[in-house]
Image: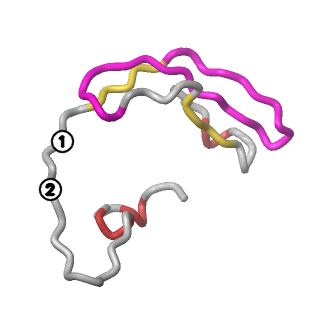
Amino acid sequence: MITNRAKLPKKTSFRFARVPNFKRAGSYYAAVLVTYPDKSQEYTRQVKVTVKRQKDKGQIVAYGAKLTAKSLIKNAKFLPK
């Protein structure tokens, strides 16, 4: 886990080195690849990612209406870009 994120340079990016299976409930271990603004990279230790079973909430949309993924997420404005 990255505990000093606020102290890292701006424009530092993070991504899973190997993306866990988010389609099945369970616990997975994955490293995070940290890329710094100067393009240097390093891996974190393995972190535990727990995927919980979610209920399908479905969405009904009128024919021809525009549906975006963002409109389905209640806290979208609080998520990172």
**Left or right of 30 in this view: 4:** right
Kindly give the residue lying farthest to the front in the view shown. Answer: 63
Picture quadrant where residue 4 is located: top right
Residue sitting at 42 percent across and 66 percent down?
A: 77
Image quarter in which the C terminus is found = bottom right
- Range of the magenta residues? 22-46
Q: Which residue is mark 2?
A: 57
Residue sitting at 37 percent across and 63 percent down?
A: 69
Residue 51 x/y as whole percent: 29, 30
In the rendered image, residue 65 lying in the magenta stretch gets the answer no
Amino acid at the residue labelled 2 = Lys
Picture quadrant where residue 27 is located: top left
Picture quadrant where residue 12 is located: top right
Q: Which residue is mark 1?
A: 54
Q: How many marks can you see?
A: 2
Tell me the CA gap for discs 2 and 1: 9 Å
In the rendered image, residue 36 lying in the magenta stretch gets the answer yes
Amino acid at the residue labelled 1 = Gln
Q: Is residue 9 above or below residue 47?
A: below
Residue 41 x/y as whole percent: 76, 28
